[in-house]
Image: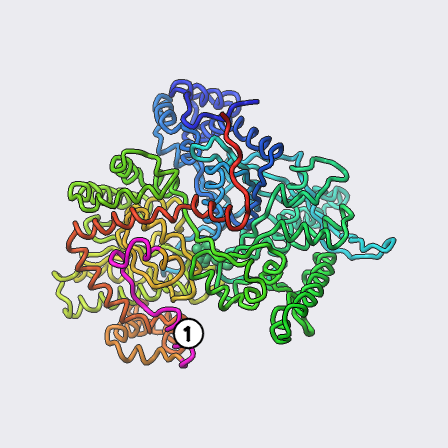
Amino acid sequence: MTELTAPKSSVTAAQFADEIRNELKYTQGVTPEQAKPADIYVATATAVRKHLMDSWMKTQQDMINGNTKAVGYLSAEFLMGKQLRNALLNSGLTDQFYAAVKELGFDAQEVIDAEYEPGLGNGGLGRLAACFIDSLASLGVPAFGYGIQYRYGIFRQEFDEDGRQIERPDYWLTNEDPWGHIDYARDQRVNFGGEVVEEDGKRVWKPAWAVRAIPVDYMVPGYESGRVNTLRLWQSRAYDEFDLLTFNKSEYLDAVKPQVEAENISKILYPEDSTEVGKELRLEQQYFFASASLHDAIRVFYGDAEKPDLTTFPDKICFQLNDTHPVIGIPELMRILIDEYGYDWDTAWDITTKTFNYTCHTLLPEALEVWPASLIGKLLPRHLEIIEKINDQFMHELADRTDDEAKIERMRILTAGENPSVRMAYLASYAGSHVNGVAELHSQLLKDVTLRDFSDIYPAKFTNVTNGVTPRRFMKLANPGLSALITEGLGTDKWLEDLELLKNLEPLAADDEFVKKFAKVKYDNKVRFADFAKAEYGFELDPTTMFDTMIKRLHEYKRQALKILEVIATYADIKSGKVKAEDVTPRTVIFGAKAAPGYYLAKMTIQLINNVAKVIDNDPDVKGKLKVVFPWNYNIRVAQMLIPATELDEQISQAGKEASGTSNMKFALNGALTVGTLDGANVEIRERVGADNFFLFGMTVDEVDKMYEGNYDPAKFYEADPRLKTAIDMVADGTFSNGDKETYAPLVSDWLTKDWFMTLADFTAYHEIQSQIETLYADQLEWNRKAILNVANSGYFSSDRSIEDYLERVWMTGPLPTEK
Ligand code: RUG
């Protein structure tokens, strides 16, 4: 059997250059002289894949032949980011790459830039899935990521002249994708529609149409583990390409219709984050990848055996349901077991419940998917029958466990009444072995509020796994300067595998020389970002100003409005002379955010931020003191440049709304200080880095709840704080819309009459904390000491630790044995 690839490859730069030449010649048919950076990129990627091939095959063999239960991570989103540098790092070929590319006469950065970033996710949820599969491979845990290879990922964001968001399709597959291998031989049939009939006392589904699910395999190399897992993303294709008869009659459009419809399923990622849209296509997508993945897992472990013993399935693999999107997999596994393999209901139920676990990522009721039963019945009639039966069984089980009829009624998976619907989070909470939230506070609120009835009846199912991020991408690749300094400070680079080792940096926060080196790294990162922003966006940034960053999806609960109102108030303070220009801490405020295309107020907030930026930029009175920039099309690539350059990180959501957040972890690990509320994982970050090293402000969850009960009136807060009043008045009076008072009227009206996420109520506290921030910033040595303490105490937020928690609390499995 082949040995696992050595973590540090023994290949020399000259050999690697030859491998690239070989790929150019024999795969691409290009000479080194003809080659462009994009050719070198494809050739390098192909060469790297070959280096990983033995380990990939061996990992799969060990998984199938061994006794270690695998993990199937079912997720509608995997926001992977660019692959090249990560693959080079994990295959130990980084140095060889730089030298080889130089030898071939190319600029390494141009080669890296030739890769197009796949945007197969909306934000935190998809990026978490990508961090998790990196950690699973790095820990040597056999795993599959299962999802969809959307042809169009998250839209490409542009801004028009008036600062409004424009969405453009993101066809990320325009050029060759050398990482994905299309495996036509391992396709799956996915059926839809039709009816269920009774045949020989059995319920038999007679589908009306089907699509072909074709897997595209991506290798997921572990860091220093020698293991390579698989990310299998499904493409949807038609079985019958097109109808030749119709085509020959010149009815071209009709002829290709079935093909277009089939391919639509994997065509586009839904550009939604916390809110859901009840679209038929979205349910088709969910069923498509859940069904193909479950069948695939059975094929992987049992081959083509006609009568496999699927009672062992939960010992082979367990599936994590990443949010409600793949929950339709529960009735699908029941159907497969009963209809395709002839198991009785109870055996099928036993297997199914042992197989699935559910992670909830939200506290917003609207983000918990609910499907009309009529729609499920139309697309998946057999599944609706199964869901009905699960619901009946559940109701009986509940009746045995409680006399509280109101509670039983509240817990229905299938709601009662004329237009019943199916609550996917409830289905997952009943059928799943474990249910977890993604930060301590979030998991507690799930138990106390969102899924309270379920946690009352099934307390043992509920657990917490706080999110984490991969230090390989978000430290080593994103921040080489800091990574080198950490390695120097600790005397080892083992921290990349055991992030808690960062704790040993703590004493160095007292060492002025180390602090100065740390400050220099941060400054260099700011210069690097300023250069990038100039080249990419034409922005002129001054790296001597404080870099104050807010990057996340644009949503009212995240409260970008709070930040921009504070910026406006500061602008007004300087203009009016209330604050002397020399007393102002010069700041560059950086926003990055996409808004869901149909989210009116979020898009208006983007427009406002852009126009505030413009007005400030054109005003000589604030030059050098305040600047706002909004790099469009924020993505992983921008994150990797911006996070290391940031000094102040804004995590200012209303308490009780952000499930966890993961950028907060990336910032702390890269030496930014956080200004934040007690929300999501902020709470745990603050506990770990120390209250003195975190700028806390704003209402707590309890205070928010009390304020809702007391009929919150935002107008009172507007009247009470003159700075807030001035800022809102400026938005209303046309200062940021060329005098037009109508432009932001809906936003202003919402703030003053509704303000559901209490931006106005937290405004004064948010301003007050700014003076503490500025006082500390004036003392750069102290600021950087605290930043080092953030880095030193954030090791807990590695996604390796999250995966270890899942292994222990949820999956009950571990790594494959290592080779001697
Ligand atoms: O909004 C949450 C973030 O708080 C969280 O950090 C992330 C990963 O757990 O998931 C985000 N999320 C939630 N994205 N979509 C949803 C909808 O349920």
Specify whether tag 1 is near ligand 1 (CB below 8 Å): no
| Residue 466 image offset from top left, x and y in percent | 44, 53
Is residue 683 visible to us here? yes
The front one of 249 and 335 is 335
The front one of 343 and 552 is 343
Is residue 166 visible to us here? no
Q: Seen from this angle, which residue lies furthest right?
A: 200
Residue under numbered circle 1:
705
Magenta range is 685-711
Q: Quadrant of the N terminus?
A: top right
Residue at coordinates 63% horizontally, 71% vertically from top-left? 402
Q: Is residue 518 above or below residue 92?
A: below
| Residue 228 image offset from top left, x and y in percent | 51, 33
| Residue 540 image offset from top left, x and y in percent | 24, 49
Q: Is residue 322 above or below residue 451?
A: above
Q: Is residue 394 above or below residue 263?
A: below
Identify the amino acid type marked 1. Asp
Q: Is residue 19 left or right of residue 417?
A: left
Magenta stretch: includes residue 638: no
